[in-house]
Image (cartoon, rainbow, N blue to C red):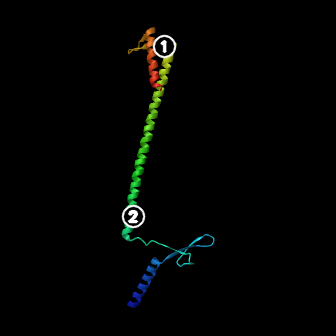
Amino acid sequence: MPALSKLFLFFMIGSLFSASIDAEVYKWVDKDGNVHFSDKPIDEKSQIVKVPKPLTKAQQDAAKAIARKAIQMHRKKMEIFSEEKREAAEKKKEKQAVEKKLSLACNSAKDDLSMFEAGAITYQLDETGQRVFHDKEAQQKKIAKLKDIVKELCK
């Protein structure tokens, strides 16, 4: 193939490629309301649609870098959100444990109070495990103290 023929073929392919890039696109709506696109106007109502030119390599690289940065930021936000959610669940669990302990202490204090008020408990054990009996005054002081404890624990 002579060099001139190769050059002609190269320019023909190049012109076809560039013509397809710069070709206009027309939009029109038929009588049924369907939207159509074409490379030629069908009637005077056909509208030219602007088709963006392809991005250059530098623009593509910049867009990819921006997308990567956006993805990294999104991942970081998700990590922070997950950590905050985990911390909130942990605090909730701790709060429930404290509330359970308070509820048990409240019930225990109520039980002790009802036993003292009924006169069922008239003594306490000392450090050595020996019974120390209460007189009426000590019994009333213990009841008053238990009422304060119940009031504090059973809010």
Residue at left 48%, top 18%?
113
The location of residue 44, given as percent across then percent down, is 56, 77
Residue at left 43%, top 39%?
90
**Mark 2: amino acid:** Lys
The location of residue 52, given as percent across then percent down, is 45, 71
Q: Which residue lies furthest to the front in this view?
A: 44
* 135 vs 10: above or below: above
* 84 vs 27: above or below: above
Residue at left 50%, top 20%?
111
Mark 2 lies on a secondary structure that is helix
- Specify the label residue 64 is tagged with: 2
* 85 vs 3: above or below: above
Q: Earlier in the sequence, mark 2 or mark 1?
A: 2
Which quadrant is the N terminus positioned in? Answer: bottom left
Q: Which of 144 and 25 is in front in this view?
A: 25
* Position of residue 43 in the picture relative to residue 83 (left or right): right
Q: Residue furthest top?
A: 135
Q: Quadrant of residue 4?
A: bottom left
* 73 vs 28: above or below: above
Q: Which residue in the protein does label 1 denote?
A: 121
**Mark 1: amino acid:** Ile
The location of residue 139, given as percent across then percent down, is 45, 11
Any part of residue 133 in sight: no
Please rate how many residues cluster around mark 2, counting C-alpha atoms within 10 Å: few if below 14, some from 14 to 19, many from 20. few
